[in-house]
Amino acid sequence: PPAYDDETEAQEGVEPDYAFLQNGPLTIALERQGRAYPLDYANVPEPIQLTMDRQSVNRVRALVLMRSYTVLDPDPDHFVFRDPFGYTWALFVAPDEGE
């Protein structure tokens, strides 16, 4: 199949069912739920856990603090926060990066 073209698809009113985000070894697959899909903020899903190098954890930490997201655990070797959609993220410094 041909590659997805967001401009053409927007004009035709077509949306992809899946989107893949990739950065290095990390790939996240997102499934479309529809525009009117209700977000259940009362049901908090399990934390999304990622292991990253210290520089990446600190970069995300800076963005979280600047955007005033809820910080649940600010430990130097792991950082846990809740994003605006209610998802909890737990970021851990890779073992070879620990001091």
Image (spheres, rainbow, N blue to C red):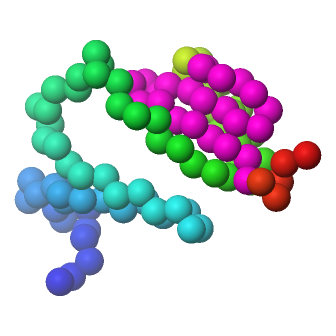
Q: Position of residue 48 (x, y in %)?
A: 47, 41
Taking the spot 25% from the left edge, 68% from the top edge, the residue there is 5
**Does 74 lie within the magenta span?**
yes
**Does 89 lie within the magenta span?**
yes
In the rendered structure, the answer to whether residue 83 lies left or right of residue 24 reads left
Taking the spot 18% from the left edge, 65% from the top edge, the residue there is 8
Taking the spot 23% from the left edge, 23% from the top edge, the residue there is 40
Residue 84: tell me if it is visible. Answer: yes
Taking the spot 19% from the left edge, 59% from the top edge, the residue there is 16
Give the residues drawn in magenta, as a range.
71-94
Say which of 58 and 16 sits in front. Answer: 58
In the rendered structure, the answer to whether residue 56 lies left or right of residue 98 reads left
Q: Position of residue 21 (x, y in %)?
A: 43, 59
Q: Quadrant of residue 1?
A: bottom left
**Residue lying at the far right of the rendered structure:** 99
Residue 55: tell me if it is visible. Answer: no
Q: Quadrant of residue 72?
A: top right
Asked if residue 64 is positioned above or below residue 55 in the image, the reply reads: above
